[in-house]
Image (cartoon, rainbow, N blue to C red):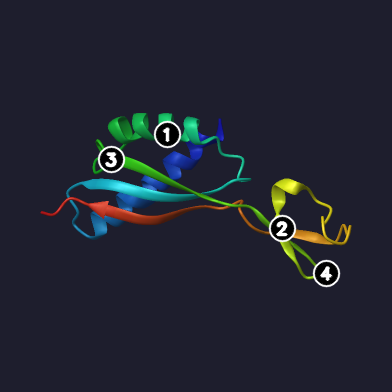
Amino acid sequence: MHELGIVFHIIKDIDKIAEENHVKQVKSVTLELGEVSGVIPEYLVDVWNWACENKSKYMKGCKLDLKIIKAITFCDSCKKTYSTLKGKICPYCGSKETWLLEGNETKIKSIEVVDS
């Protein structure tokens, strides 16, 4: 379950930011998650809730807000984009010269803190 490692990495980064900025508590985090990132949202939320309560000084009760980023593939042959979920072969021209443009990332979009 790589969701655990992802959550630990994010919490480590947020704890560092909270400490550097003298934040007492992080209220919520918005995370952008690509639809082909390989991360299972339900597992991520379960691990998040456990880790915030048990592994972070600043994030007890912190809410996770997931924003799913659609996976988009670009075709080098016809220069069009399409949903990656349609496959590797371009649905417009049949080319195999395609590459993932977006949709496999996992990144922190925003952090909301409790006012001191």
Which quadrant of the rendered structure holds the C terminus?
bottom left
Q: Determine the residue located farthest toward the left in the rendered image.
A: 116
Which quadrant of the rendered structure holds the N terminus?
top right
Viewer-nearest residue: 43 or 52 = 43
Question: Looking at numbered disc 1 in the image, what kind of residue is underneath it?
Answer: Val
Viewer-nearest residue: 115 or 58 = 115
Q: Position of residue 64 (x, y in %)?
A: 36, 42
101 vs 18, left or right, is right
For the residues labelled 2 and 1, say whether their Cβ atoms are less than 8 Å apart: no
7 vs 77, left or right, is left
111 vs 10, left or right, is left
User: Is label 3 in a helix, a strand or a loop?
Assistant: loop
Say which residue label 1 marks.
45
**Of discs 4 and 1, which sits in the foreground?**
4
User: Is label 4 in a helix, a strand or a loop?
Assistant: loop
Badge 1 crowding class, 10 Å Cα cut-off, few under 14, some 14 to 19, many 20 or more, is some
Viewer-nearest residue: 46 or 86 = 86
**Of discs 3 and 4, which sits in the foreground?**
4
Badge 3 crowding class, 10 Å Cα cut-off, few under 14, some 14 to 19, many 20 or more, is many
